[in-house]
Image: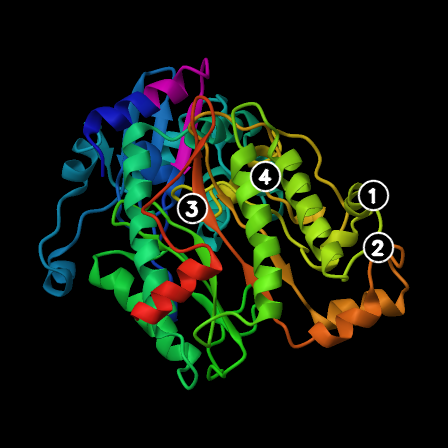
């Protein structure tokens, strides 16, 4: 965690945006796999960590704006617990490290809230079942109504604070991305005919854990790159294929990296693979060059889409005017997702608070296929950290459906696409922070060009 003053200043900035009432934050609980004592690895709620720094299950916090008090609620370990876990810091010690001098038992939270005497109790949208149960017990709100009852002013205040990363947060993100680069280099060196996807996924996980980190999200490592979130490691790599890895590390302070790379299973890309790779790389580099304060990310996304259309036209896979093709959504046959998203303590940063606030500042999202999956559209600001991840994917089921429906015939050369049904997909992803006058790629350098990738594979 950071110094106590960091958390004090964060809470003070948050409190300054409200006149009265109570701000309620719920931490996470342990989550059991198949019986009570066999739990998934614990992950604290990110907003709870951001303001209170306590990385322990079963906690909650209350900021009383009228009394000027902040209290963290939770229970210390019993002697029976310590037998299994060893001696752990007390809740008072943990809260003190975040500049909080008031703690109370978990059961006392209910009585504190009953004493609110009609004052507003603001809370964030619940995204886990235990949050829903707690809020139902504490506030008597039907679980089906909790999302609608969540405080929009609190959501917006938290989003605007967490979206702008401080210098110390950027350092932690640099550590996460550096380690993520190591994970990708290990995979590139290992990907060869006869190697299994499972073996590479295990190696990537080992790199993160050996450095004292965890995975930011389950590893996506596959020769079926056309499946955007493929978490199955069932294939053995074969000559002529490509291997796509989407993986990132999460540091002990819970900041995430999120990178994607694509490499040939053979020593080098084939001509056809290289042609598509160069189109994606051109869109990627153009998008990063366009990032600067005040530029709406939606416009960067659309510009990258036009670049990919022009590249696919040059290869005979698309036709017509690129701007018209993108306006009609024809590019989404090959790029059915968004160019990027916010990144921080969550790999899709603050997604539990709602994309309409995180990525759109309350403005409505598009309903067009492809564009509706863009998680970030708002004008960029210094301190934002985001991913840039264009890709081209040949999804046979989608191509067949569009061709059958005669969709976008004026822009897509369907007959030529039949020879690409076995191509899979390519994605290039890096993590970027917006500076005062442009953007900076986070983390140490990693191979991006086909020549650089071939060099790494030769050295491996």
Q: Does 153 appear above or below 267?
A: above
| Circle nearer the viewer, 2 or 3 | 2
Front tag of 4 and 2: 2
In the rendered structure, find residue 324 and report the number of the disc placed on it. Answer: 1
Label 3 – label 4 distance at C-alpha: 14 Å
Q: Which callout, 1 or 4, points at the residue further toward the start of the chain? A: 1
Task: Answer whether residue 227 is visible to the viewer in this image.
Answer: no
Q: What label does residue 411 carry, if any? A: 2
Instruction: Give the SS element for disc 4.
Output: loop
Are discs 4 and 2 less than 8 Å apart at CB?
no
Q: Position of residue 211 (x, y in %)?
A: 21, 58
Quickly name the residue at label 4: 376
Check if mark 2's residue and mark 1's residue have beta carbons within 8 Å: yes
Which segment is the magenta one?
A: 11-26
> Between disc 4 and disc 2, whose residue precedes?
4
Question: For the residue carrying disc 2, how many other residues have a C-alpha within 10 Å: few (<14), some (14-19), or many (20+)?
Answer: many
> Mark 2: which secondary structure?
loop
Q: Earlier in the sequence, mark 2 or mark 3?
A: 3
Per the model, the C-alpha gap separating discs 2 and 3 is 37 Å
Q: In what quadrant of the picture does the N terminus appear?
A: top left
Q: Does residue 143 appear left or right of residue 414 in this picture? A: left
Residue 189, how many percent across, how many down? Answer: 34, 70
Q: Nearer the viewer, residue 382 or 194?
A: 194
Identified at 60% across, 47% down, the residue is: 283
| Residue that numbered label 3 is attached to | 346
Tell me which residue sits at (31%, 42%) in the image: 174
């Amino acid at each position: 965690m950071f110094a106590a003053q960091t958390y004090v200043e964060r809470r003070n900035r948050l409190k300054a945006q409200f006149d009265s009432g109570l701000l309620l934050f719920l931490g996470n609980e342990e989550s059991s796999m198949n019986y009570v004592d066999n739990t998934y690895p614990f992950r604290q709620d990110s907003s709870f960590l951001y303001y209170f720094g306590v990385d322990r299950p079963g906690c909650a916090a209350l900021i009383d704006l009228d009394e000027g008090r902040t209290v963290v609620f939770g229970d210390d370990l019993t002697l029976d617990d310590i037998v299994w876990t060893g001696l752990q810091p007390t809740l008072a010690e943990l809260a003190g490290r975040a500049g909080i001098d008031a703690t109370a038992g978990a059961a006392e939270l209910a009585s504190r809230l009953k004493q609110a005497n009609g004052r507003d109790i603001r809370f964030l949208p619940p995204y886990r079942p235990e949050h829903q149960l707690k809020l139902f017990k504490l506030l008597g709100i039907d679980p089906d109504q909790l999302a609608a009852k969540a405080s929009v002013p609190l959501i917006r205040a938290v989003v605007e604070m967490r979206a702008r990363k401080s210098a110390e947060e950027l350092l932690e993100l640099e550590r996460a991305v550096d380690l993520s680069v190591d994970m990708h280099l290990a995979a590139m060196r290992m990907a060869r005919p006869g190697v299994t996807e499972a073996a590479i996924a295990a190696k990537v996980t080992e790199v993160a854990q050996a450095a004292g980190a965890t995975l930011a999200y389950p590893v996506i490592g596959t020769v079926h790159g056309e499946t955007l979130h493929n978490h199955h490691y069932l294939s053995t790599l074969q000559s002529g294929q490509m291997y796509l890895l989407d993986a990132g590390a999460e540091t002990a302070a819970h900041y995430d990296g999120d990178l994607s790379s694509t490499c040939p299973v053979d020593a080098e890309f084939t001509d056809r693979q290289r042609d598509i790779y160069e189109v994606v790389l051109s869109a990627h580099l153009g998008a990063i060059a366009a990032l600067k304060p005040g530029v709406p990310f939606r416009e960067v996304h659309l510009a990258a889409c036009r670049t990919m259309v022009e590249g696919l036209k040059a290869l005979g896979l698309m036709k017509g005017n690129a701007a018209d093709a993108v306006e009609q959504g024809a590019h989404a046959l090959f790029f059915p997702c968004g160019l990027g998203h916010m990144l921080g303590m969550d790999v899709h940063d603050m997604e539990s608070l709602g994309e309409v606030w995180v990525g759109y500042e309350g403005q409505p999202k598009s309903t067009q296929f492809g564009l509706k999956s863009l998680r970030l559209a708002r004008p960029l600001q210094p301190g934002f950290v985001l991913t840039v991840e264009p890709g081209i994917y040949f999804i046979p089921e989608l191509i067949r459906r569009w061709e059958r429906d005669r969709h976008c015939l004026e822009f897509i050369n369907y007959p030529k696409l039949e020879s690409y049904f076995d191509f899979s997909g390519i994605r290039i992803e890096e993590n970027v922070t917006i500076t005062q006058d442009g953007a900076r790629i986070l983390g140490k350098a990693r191979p991006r060009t086909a020549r650089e990738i071939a060099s790494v594979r030769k050295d491996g």
